[in-house]
Amino acid sequence: MAKNKVVRVVTLHIPAGEAGPANVGKDLGPLGINLMEFCKRYNALTAERRGFVVPAVITVYEDRSFDVAIKQPTTASLIRKVAGLDKGAAKPGHESAGVVTTAQLKEVATIKLPDLNTTDLDKAIKIVAGTARSMGLTVVD
């Protein structure tokens, strides 16, 4: 089936399995797509990833139909999960939110590798370590 012309591509970061018209309406409502259909589709695609924030790339077409592509969970939510934290530091650089090991960063980098702009695992670990430091975490070996 041939799709109409693409009108807009929107990326939303939504907690997995928790999309509802109330939390996506202000972003998707003006585009004219069916909010309940989007929420059902997103929640079905992300049901097994509850506890993570999962980006969704929504491609909206001229006839108000849409496609949803799900990416890997955000780096910050993966780091919080492996480090056992609820959130990062309120003032990164001034206070520490906790400690994360290089092994934990490698685990996160392996998961995030398809979405990063590198294919080298060592470089991916450095990218993830930067995110961890910006969250106020101390990286140890």
Image: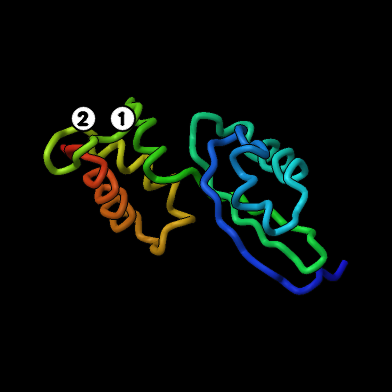
The image quarter containing residue 18 is top right
Residue 129, above or below 40: below
State left or right for residue 28 relative to residue 126.
right
Residue at the image point whose x is 73% and y is 45% from the top: 35
Q: Give me the C-alpha separation between circle 2 and circle 1.
A: 8 Å
Residue at the image point whose x is 59% and y is 50% from the top: 56
Q: Nearer the viewer, residue 120 or 2?
A: 2
Which element carries disc 1, helix, strand or loop?
helix
Residue at the image point whose x is 14% and y is 43% from the top: 93
Which three-letter amino acid code belongs to the residue tagged 2? Gly
Q: Nearer the viewer, residue 58 or 106?
A: 58
**Percent position (x, y) of residue 70?**
60, 49
Which element carries disc 2, helix, strand or loop?
strand
**Percent position (x, y) of residue 68?**
68, 53
State left or right for residue 6 relative to residue 88.
right
Which three-letter amino acid code belongs to the residue tagged 1? Ala
Residue 2, above or below 101: below
Q: Report the residue marked by disc 1.
A: 83
Q: Report the residue marked by disc 2.
A: 98
Confirm or deny contact between disc 2 and disc 1 (CB under 8 A).
yes
Q: Quadrant of the C terminus?
A: top left
Label located before the other in sequence (2 or 1): 1
Residue 107, above or below 125: above
Q: Nearer the viewer, mark 2 or mark 1?
A: 2
Q: Nearer the viewer, residue 49 or 36?
A: 36
Task: Judge the density around disc 1: few (<14), some (14-19), many (≥20) Cα neighbours within 10 Å.
Answer: some
Tell which residue pokes out farthest to the right in this image.
1
State left or right for residue 2 relative to residue 27.
right
Could you say which disc has been placed on residue 107 in the image?
none
**Percent position (x, y) of residue 108?**
38, 42
**Percent position (x, y) of residue 112?**
43, 49
The image quarter containing residue 32 is bottom right
